[in-house]
Amino acid sequence: MPKITREEKNVLKSYERGEWRPSARSKKAMDKYKTYARATIQKNKRVNIRLSSQDLEGIQQRALEEGIPYQTLIASLIHKYVAGGLSERRA
């Protein structure tokens, strides 16, 4: 087992003492991730796309913050745009 930091040990001890409770956002977050999962499962076409390294790194960072694979984030963004959930900003 890899070494864990002092902070990680404190979080683990806190969890084991029963100090953690589900947040009110859990249902909303679960629904969001279920949508991501469904979109991932329903894929039946492959697309290759060239991106700048800066854009790819930015997408990967945002995906990391969301806790999802970056390809899932890209697919989700495209789906939202096509479904009308995202639109271009007008200057």
Image (tube, rainbow, N blue to C red):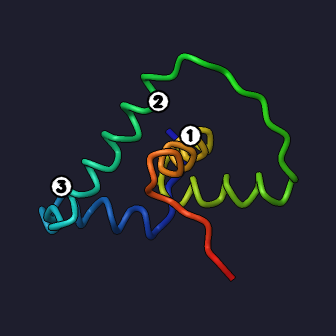
Left or right of residue 9, residue 3 in this image:
right
Q: As rendered, which of 6 and 71 lies closer to the eye?
A: 71
Q: Amino acid at mark 3?
A: Lys
Residue drawn at 83 percent across, 47 percent down = 51
Left or right of residue 13, residue 83 in this image:
right
| Residue contact at pointers 3 and 1, CB within 8 angstroms | no
| Residue contact at pointers 1 and 2, CB within 8 angstroms | yes
List the single residue furthest toward the top: 44
Ranked by sequence position, the earlier of labels 3 and 1 is 3
Q: Which residue is mark 3?
A: 27
Ranked by sequence position, the earlier of labels 2 and 3 is 3
Q: As rendered, which of 71 and 76 lies closer to the eye?
A: 76
Q: In the rendering, which numbered label is found on residue 66?
A: none
Residue drawn at 44 percent across, 70 percent down = 7
Q: Which residue is mark 2?
A: 40
Q: Quadrant of residue 28?
A: bottom left
Q: Which residue is mark 1?
A: 75
- Give residue 89's position: percent from left, percent from top: 61, 74
- Give residue 81's position: percent from left, percent from top: 53, 51
Residue drawn at 50 percent across, 55 percent down = 4
- Element assignment for label 3: helix
Q: As rendered, which of 2 and 38 lies closer to the eye?
A: 38
- Element assignment for label 1: helix
In the image, residue 42 sits, relative to residue 88, either above or below, namely above
- Give residue 5's position: percent from left, percent from top: 51, 63
